[in-house]
Image: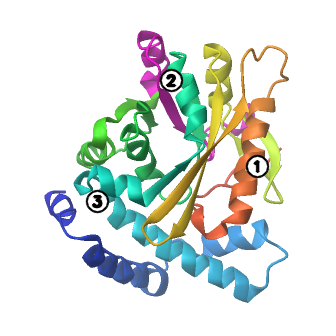
């Protein structure tokens, strides 16, 4: 881990050379989850030709390698650099909640470089609580925490989320959740048609929204060019939520995520086994 930490001191121009090598290994040598990625893309975009699918896959692997080196670089970026490299659109929506001393939920996804987004907000005066899933390896988990806590981001492990929300309920801040991965228990999931496939969505994010009665925004993140990103915040819903049917909040999130992926298909994390659960 110390070696990886030292790598963060290298300039991005050098790190991108390393990224090119990592991409070559992932795509051409190791073939990291290559069959899974191609299967996902073919099912998600049945209208695209084999050549188009291959082009998206290659861009995805290039981007995946970039995320690796960019995350290592995060603690060593200056405030000016992080603000130049991540454009925040519709920040007025977030500032409005903060001005009212209102904590709010942000539902995001593993799109573009999601690791840079919290820092791009704290450096603009938006306090961020970033919810994360603890890694199995303790050393790896501590290392990732040290990266993600850059620029004053407050980290919350998923099991402690509700406790933290209660103890910090009077603090105006963005509470960021990444809600696009496959749930552990498909029998309790919300099921929708997503990218032409029956897809299980984690119900916990909607339960949190209903329990806290906090406003919800969607973080639409996409890549402009290498090392430069945009995050656009869009309102999903405002409380109260009692009148909304079960699963409707999740469906609104699903619709926005699907639209984002269709616009920027190479930016999503296609190597995640998203469709491992089948609807019974």
Work out whether mark 3 precedes mark 1 in sequence or the reverse, and give the earlier one: 3
**In which quadrant of the rendered image does the C terminus lie?**
top right
Q: Residue 166 magenta-drawn? A: yes
Q: Residue 187 magenta-drawn? A: yes
Q: Which residue is mark 2?
A: 98
Instruction: Report helix, strand or loop for mark 3.
Output: helix
Residue 72 badge: 3
Q: Quadrant of residue 102?
A: top right
Would residue 190 be seen by someone viewing this image from the given angle? no
What residue do we see at 28% from left, 59% from top? 72
- On the image, the x and y values in percent for residue 172 come to 47, 20
Magenta stretch in the rendered image: 159-188
Q: Is residue 47 left or right of residue 91?
A: right
Q: Which residue is mark 1?
A: 199
Work out whether mark 1 precedes mark 2 in sequence or the reverse, and give the earlier one: 2
Q: Decide: is 193 above or below 204.
A: below
């Amino acid at each position: 881990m110390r070696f990886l930490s030292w790598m963060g001191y290298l300039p991005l121009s050098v790190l991108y050379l390393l990224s090119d090598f990592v991409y070559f290994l992932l795509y051409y040598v190791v073939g990291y989850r290559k069959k899974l990625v191609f299967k996902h893309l073919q099912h998600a975009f049945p209208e695209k030709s084999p050549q188009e699918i291959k082009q998206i896959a290659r861009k995805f692997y290039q981007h995946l390698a970039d995320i690796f080196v960019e995350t290592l670089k995060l603690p060593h970026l200056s405030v000016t650099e992080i603000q130049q490299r991540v454009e925040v659109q519709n920040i007025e929506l977030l500032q409005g909640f903060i001005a009212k001393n209102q904590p709010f939920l942000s539902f995001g996804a593993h799109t573009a470089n999601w690791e840079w987004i919290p820092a791009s907000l704290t450096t603009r005066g938006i306090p961020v609580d970033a919810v994360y899933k603890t890694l199995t390896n303790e050393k790896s988990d501590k290392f990732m925490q040290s990266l993600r806590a850059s620029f004053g981001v407050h980290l919350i492990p998923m099991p402690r989320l509700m406790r933290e929300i209660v103890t910090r309920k009077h603090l105006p801040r963005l509470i960021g959740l990444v809600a696009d991965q496959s749930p552990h228990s498909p029998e309790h999931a919300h099921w929708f048609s997503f990218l032409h496939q029956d897809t299980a969505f984690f119900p916990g994010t909607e339960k949190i929204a209903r329990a806290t009665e906090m406003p919800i925004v969607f973080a639409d993140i996409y890549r402009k060019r290498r090392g430069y990103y945009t995050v656009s915040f869009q309102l999903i819903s405002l409380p109260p939520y009692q009148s909304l049917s079960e699963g409707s909040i999740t469906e609104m999130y699903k619709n926005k995520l699907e639209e984002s992926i269709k616009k920027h298909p190479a930016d999503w994390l296609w190597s995640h086994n998203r469709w491992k659960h089948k609807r019974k």
